[in-house]
Image (cartoon, grey):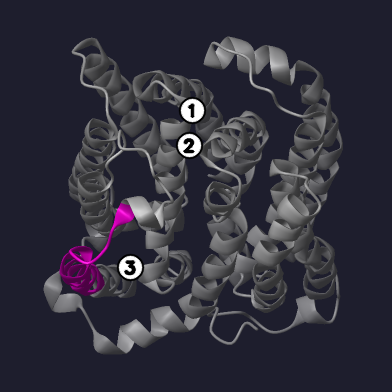
Amino acid sequence: MVKRSILINFGVKGISIFINFLLVRVTYDFLKDKETYGVWLTILSVLSYISLFDMGLGNGLRNKLAEKISLKQFDHGKMYVSTAYGVLGIIVGVLILIFLAANQFLHWNDIFNITSDKVKLDTPITIILVSYLFIFFFSLINSVSFANQDSSIPGIITLITNLLIVISIYVCHLMGSSSIFTLSIIFSEVTLLVLICANIYLFSYKYKDIVPKRTLVKRAVIGDILNVGVKFFLIQIMSMVIFMSSSMVILQSLGANYVTEYQIVYKYFSVFIIASSLIMTPLWSAYTDAYVRKDFVWIRNTIRKLVKLMIPLTICIFGSIFFADFVIKIWMGESFNISLSLYLLMAVYTMIYIWISIFAYLLNGTNKPNIQLITLLIGGIINIPISLYFAKTLGLGNSGIVLGSICALSLFALAGPIQVYYEFYNKKRTQEGPITSLEGAE
């Protein structure tokens, strides 16, 4: 099943990479200038923080549901799905009411440090945030798919979404309607519509055994999911600080034009992150299944193969630097004044990101995230101040922001492999009695 998911992922992601790069170019042309595009990219990065409000429910459901599926306990699985949807629905409803009440006192142009009169953010932000809270709720179908080891389904959903967004942007561009307001409607409503359709289709045909029902929402199950998910919730917070705060830090300290350059380089190297995720994403729930069955030989062999793959991948990452300017000029239609240091540091960042993912997926899938949580907590605390120090005090600009993120990630890059060796290569620990649940796995 894992191999099948990986093969499907490669096909889906191959098309998705092309569509994603096309989406960047179409959006850039649609907004017409670097500053406005930089503001839009920052808005999208801030939207990622919405996922924090599930308090770990998504990943908690992913692990608990995968466990119940592995043990053939489908009735319990249905209860977990129903409870997760019920609780998340309440959270989303409360957040929408709070936002609508507070929004009238917020001035989004000031928050995003926008002084230009040509960019008005109040209405677009309202549309995007309310829509994305609903998107946040319906995205729970991704956790259900991952738990069923159908990791290609979230990729297919994203592919269809991005394709429809590209078409919508192109049509609006031809009609002469080019603004952040129009873009906010396209991104939010297309994404929401696709996810609603995905939920209806998948629960009607593919996941009929675990269709959520209001009567199966159980208070006792909430704690069960959160006991698994709360650590992932804290990891999400720290990951967001490290991975997603860069655009806002750049916008506030260097300006919107720098955001565009940073994001263009990041998206160029993200091809390698996407390629690695094709292999590793299906493994999270596969690790859960193997751990419940005590198949430690498969776990060790899988990690060994992934580590070996880092050698050719690292060569490709650094080799791509030589073609970066040429590719970006063809891709974006113009040259960007990007320094060699930014390319080099983004290559290092990409390599470290993939390296830590190898070990994080295993530890997350087997409910052993403590070391990851501690190292990311420290990294999250130091990331913004050290990034600002490198960027402004030392005058490294965008390169300093990337260097700060590298420093923040390095802690788990060292600690992760050590923990995996201790947990899965120690004969005493891997010869314990049968595992019937992830509870108490730590």
- x then y, percent, for residue 5: 52, 39
- Residue 96 figure quarter: bottom left
Residue 183 found in image quarter: top left
Identity, as a three-letter code, of the amino acid under mark 3: Phe
Q: Can residue 150 be seen in this view?
A: no
Q: Which portion, as a residue range, is magenta? A: 89-108
Alpha carbons under labels 1 and 3: distance apart? 51 Å
Q: Type of residue at label 1?
A: Lys
Using the numbered discs, state the Cα–Cα distance from disc 2 to disc 3 in whole angstroms.
46 Å
Q: Is residue 300 toward the left or the right of residue 32 in the image?
A: right
Q: Which residue is drawn at 62% across and 82% down?
A: 441
Disc on the earlier residue, 2 or 3: 2
Label number found at residue 223 = none
- Magenta part mainly helix, strand or loop? helix
Up-down relation of residue 295 to residue 155 (above or below): below
| Residue 41 screen position, x and y as percent | 45, 40
The residue that mark 3 highlights is 74
Can you identify the residue that label 2 sits on? 38
- Answer with left or right where residue 7 lies relative to residue 409: left
Q: Which mark is residue 34?
A: 1
The total number of labels drawn is 3
Alpha carbons under labels 1 and 2: distance apart: 6 Å
Residue type, mark 2 in image: Gly
Residue 304 pos. (x, y %) = 82, 51
Residue in view at x 48 percent, y 65 percent: 70
